[in-house]
Amino acid sequence: MRKTVALLTVLAGCYACRSSGTNQKVIAIIPKGTAALFWQSVHSGAMAAGRDFHVTVLWNGPALETDFSRQIQIVDSMIARHVDGIGVSASDHTALNGVIERATRVGIPVTVFDSGVSTTEYMTFLATNNSEAGEMAARKLAELVQGKGKVAMLRHVPGSVSTGDRETRFEEVMAKDFPQIRIVARQFGMAEPAKAQAAAENFLSAHPDLDGIFASGEASTLGAAQALKGRRLGGKVRLVGFDFGDELLADLRTGIISALIVQDPFRIGYDTVKTLVDKLNGRSSPKRIDLTARVIIAADLDKPEIKALLFPDLRHLN
């Protein structure tokens, strides 16, 4: 995972260097975190769109996905800088409302991407259909545990709309369609693999007969996989996780992870910039744009279409 993150960061940074000093329109893209591979892939997609549409993309976000006060500061700084457009993935569904509304009032179009807000004072919301993705996870885990048994939910962080939608739908589907499956534990991993691992260890200690785990984000999946490896329970306790990276894909291939629900973060970054460029050019975008996730298992990893999704062609950023 570290090698992939480093490569994406360097490539995206090279483009950012070439963009400076021009008279291009300036679009700020503000993720809710920067550490996870997911955000590095969003970054690369945004930079690719910047090149294709001849705009300067400013990428800046807090180091931790739980630091919404820092994210508010960054959005405020971009408003003060009078950028031409803002894309923001909200770390909390209410905390960012004020700065998003402020940007809109001063005439800066805002696209909210990946994780939503409770205000409607933005131009477009673009994200994976996370309710649908949560249902995919529920049905896949139910299939893996043969429709019965005990499972646990390793949640992401409180207040995150994207992961919250996945978790809510996961529970709804389990309760409605799989009554012989009991969700016996729920805990937040707080977007940190070490904390997620500790939470998963708690599950496994309290429920030695646990049949499965659903992890709703990249950090939670990493932590759950580490816990299973430490107890040599890979393949015995079924793990359905979210997102991807070098470590997660390796664990999927070896059977520690049974299935991953994967998004297209490169496209999320690219299309976020595109909606803002369209607005600057007098074209409107839908209020909501849903993207579809997909379930992958180890047998899918060598399929060309899966390789294209997991390893986007980054040569155009050189």
Image (cartoon, grey):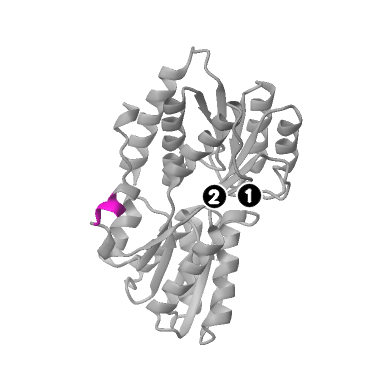
> What's the magenta region?
303-307
The quarter of the rendered structure image containing the C terminus is top left
Residue 306 lies within the magenta run: yes
Task: Classify 229 as above or below 143.
Answer: above
Q: Secondary structure at mark 1?
A: loop
Label 2: which residue? Answer: 127
Q: Position of residue 168 (x, y in %)?
A: 60, 67
Task: Classify 121 as above or below 263.
Answer: above
Q: Residue at x 36, y 50 (%)?
A: 245
Q: Position of residue 71 (x, y in %)?
A: 63, 37
For the stretch drawn in magenta, what is the main secondary structure? helix
Residue lying at the far left in this picture: please name it: 302
Q: Position of residue 106 (x, y in %)?
A: 74, 27
Is 230 left, or right, of 206 in this rendering? left
Q: Residue at x 46, y 61 (%)?
A: 197
Q: Position of residue 92 (x, y in %)?
A: 66, 49
Residue 261 lies within the magenta run: no
Q: Residue at x 52, y 69 (%)?
A: 153
Closest to the observer, 180 or 278: 278
Residue lying at the far front in this picture: please name it: 283
Kind of residue indicated by mark 2: Ala
Q: Is residue 36 visible?
A: no
**Looking at the image, do the residues carrying marks 2 and 1 touch, with CB atoms under 8 Å apart?**
yes
Closest to the observer, 145 or 158: 145
Q: Residues within 10 Å of mark 1 (few under 14, many from 20)?
A: many
Residue 226 in which image quadrant: bottom left
Determine the CA span between mark 2 and mark 1.
Answer: 8 Å
Residue 279 in which image quadrant: top right
Label 1: which residue? Answer: 116
Camera-nearest label, 2 or 1: 2
Kind of residue indicated by mark 1: Gly
Q: Residue at x 63, y 49 (%)?
A: 116
